[in-house]
Image (tube, rainbow, N blue to C red):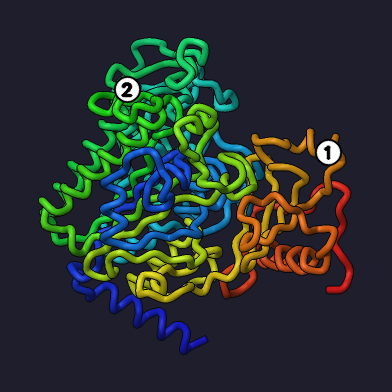
């Protein structure tokens, strides 16, 4: 115990006396509903032009077996920031709304807290979607009609380790539509806006109050303008910075603007992906112009797979598959739901042009930054996080050996090596067969796949390999009940977590 305390004090002392110029700046760009097949670095057959992301990949490392911790928005964001699987929190399924209260308690460790302790300035710009506490006339009523926009917002990103934040609360199709700058609404709503899916199948968004300075088509470029201004500002200081930039695109409303509108010659979704790529290129150029490019670690990834809103049928006519041959899409427990593009670029420390099959999860940001900043591992914080540094240095794997994935409906899967067990009869999400349909067809309550031989997850091996399925169930139970999948002391989950489908019991033998 004494030795452990001394080690912790030594690490803290080293941080306090560290030359901050040696610590990399960090930019984490999180696209919204972008499929692994939608960018050329992770899909050689991609029909959407993404030259800036390709250049970023050519100058860094591309992970070909990377995953969001969930197949939908809110849970993945929880995992990115906490390094902890989302289902350990109170959110058992689904996503939050634009009026939801905060999900991450102030006391829960986040990567922003971690970097702040290491001397970083921390900033969030973009789509939060983890809830914050609006000022309400009636505290029990969660609808936007009950919000007093003139009063401060509480328990936003600032209680989760960010020095400042600027963004909107939910997805860009969720009211209310106002900007909040570190607890203050920048402009009161002056109109009601909304577009139905019948009016625009791509650009629809729910009707609600909109701030006088909020314009749907301008949201994506506006956020990148804010991010670029932040980089220029912080580059003038001697303090390292962490910019968390969660985008609202290419999620609905799909609203590309010139010169990207119509540029793909496919559909608005493809145009919007091109726009994301273009803005990323502008941000990367800014890092160079500001003189901080060499020692800035930039991540680019997505919170889950592509949404059906992108129009898979039409994209297929052009030879484009957002899921790149993997089964399913956003919301699903199948690979298309949670296997995502993941690129890291850090000229000073990552050899250019690397591609790796190392298993990775977006929760791994936490432990990666913990190791880079030289901080000791603690029992609470990053419970499901494994450092990516071995992969950055050319190793074929990290210390991550398993992956637990989660669907919008709360279905689990566990992966070990090439084996994947889905604890669901169907997709667990939106693609066919949905769970109710799968049960009506009396499909097996679980699905076992060998991804090496069957990347499309079409052949269920449960009936012929039940011992392997049982081993994976025992492994899942261990990682669920231990409160962590990384090495360390057992810690509690925030709720009682159940993962077996109805009618399935724990196998005997362990």
The spot of residue 229 in percent (x, y) is: 17, 41
Circles 2 and 1: CB atoms closer than 8 Å:
no
The furthest residue to the bottom = 3
Q: Earlier in the sequence, mark 2 or mark 1?
A: 2
The residue carrying pointer 2 sits among few (fewer than 14), some (14 to 19) or many (20 or more) residues within 10 Å by Cα, namely: some
**SS label for mark 1:** helix
In the image: residue 380, left or right of residue 472: left
Label 1, on which residue? 439
**SS label for mark 2:** helix
Residue 257 or residue 136, whichever sits in front: 257
Q: CA distance from mark 2 to mark 1?
A: 42 Å
**Number of numbered discs present?**
2
Vertical arrangement, residue 337 with respect to residue 311, above or below: below
Residue 113 or residue 253, whichever sits in front: 253
Vertical arrangement, residue 91 with respect to residue 146, above or below: below
In the image: residue 437, left or right of residue 284: right
The spot of residue 123 in percent (x, y) is: 30, 48
Residue 52 or residue 75, whichever sits in front: 52
Q: Residue at x 48, y 67 (%)?
A: 358
In the image: residue 87, left or right of residue 144: right
Label 2, on which residue? 217
Residue 335 or residue 326, whichever sits in front: 326
In the image: residue 248, left or right of residue 233: right
Q: Nearer the viewer, mark 2 or mark 1?
A: 1
Q: Residue at x 89, y 68 (%)?
A: 508
């Amino acid at each position: 115990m004494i030795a452990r305390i001394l080690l912790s004090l030594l690490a803290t002392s080293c941080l306090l006396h560290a030359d901050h110029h040696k610590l990399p700046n960090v930019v984490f760009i999180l696209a919204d509903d972008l499929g692994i097949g939608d960018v050329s670095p992770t899909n050689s057959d991609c029909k959407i032009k993404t030259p800036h992301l390709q250049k970023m990949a050519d100058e860094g490392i591309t992970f070909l077996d990377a995953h969001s911790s969930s197949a939908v928005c809110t849970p993945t964001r929880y995992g990115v920031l906490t390094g902890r699987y989302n289902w350990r929190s109170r959110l058992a399924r689904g996503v939050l709304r634009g009026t939801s209260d905060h999900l991450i308690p102030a006391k829960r460790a986040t990567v922003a807290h971690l970097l702040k302790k290491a001397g970083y300035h921390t900033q969030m710009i973009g789509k939060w979607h983890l809830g914050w506490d609006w000022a309400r006339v009636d505290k029990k009523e969660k609808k936007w009609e009950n919000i007093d926009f003139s009063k401060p917002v509480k328990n936003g990103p600032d209680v989760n380790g960010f020095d400042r934040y600027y963004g909107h609360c939910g997805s860009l199709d969720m009211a209310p539509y106002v900007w909040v700058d570190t607890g203050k609404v920048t402009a009161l709503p002056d109109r009601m806006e909304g577009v139905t899916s019948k009016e625009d199948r791509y650009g629809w968004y729910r009707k609600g109050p909109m701030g006088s300075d909020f314009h749907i088509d301008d949201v994506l470029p506006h956020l990148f303008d804010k991010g670029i201004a932040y980089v220029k500002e912080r580059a003038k200081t001697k303090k390292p910075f962490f910019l968390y930039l969660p985008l609202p695109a290419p999620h609905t409303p799909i609203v590309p603007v010139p010169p990207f509108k119509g540029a793909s010659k496919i559909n608005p979704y493809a145009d919007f992906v091109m726009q994301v790529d273009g803005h990323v290129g502008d941000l990367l150029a800014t890092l160079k112009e500001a003189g901080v490019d060499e020692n800035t670690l930039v991540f680019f990834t997505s919170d889950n797979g592509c949404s059906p809103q992108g129009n898979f049928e039409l994209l297929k006519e052009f030879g484009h598959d957002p899921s790149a041959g993997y089964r399913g899409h956003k919301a699903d427990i199948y690979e298309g739901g949670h296997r995502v593009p993941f690129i890291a670029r850090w000229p000073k420390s990552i050899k250019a042009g690397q591609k790796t099959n190392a298993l990775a999860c977006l929760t791994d940001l936490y432990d990666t930054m913990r190791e880079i900043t030289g901080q000791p591992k603690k029992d609470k914080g990053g419970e499901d996080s494994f450092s990516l540094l071995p992969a950055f240095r050319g190793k074929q794997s990290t210390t991550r050996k398993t992956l637990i994935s989660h669907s919008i409906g709360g279905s689990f899967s566990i992966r070990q090596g090439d084996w994947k067990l889905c604890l669901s009869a169907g997709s667990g999400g939106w693609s066919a067969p949905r769970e109710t349909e799968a049960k009506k067809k009396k499909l097996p309550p679980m699905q076992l796949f060998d991804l090496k031989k069957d990347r499309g997850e079409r052949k269920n091996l449960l009936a012929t390999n039940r011992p392997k399925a049982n081993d994976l169930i025992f492994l899942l139970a261990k990682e669920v009940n231990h409160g962590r999948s990384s090495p360390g002391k057992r810690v509690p989950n925030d709720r009682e977590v159940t993962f077996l489908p109805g009618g399935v019991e724990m196998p005997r033998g362990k």
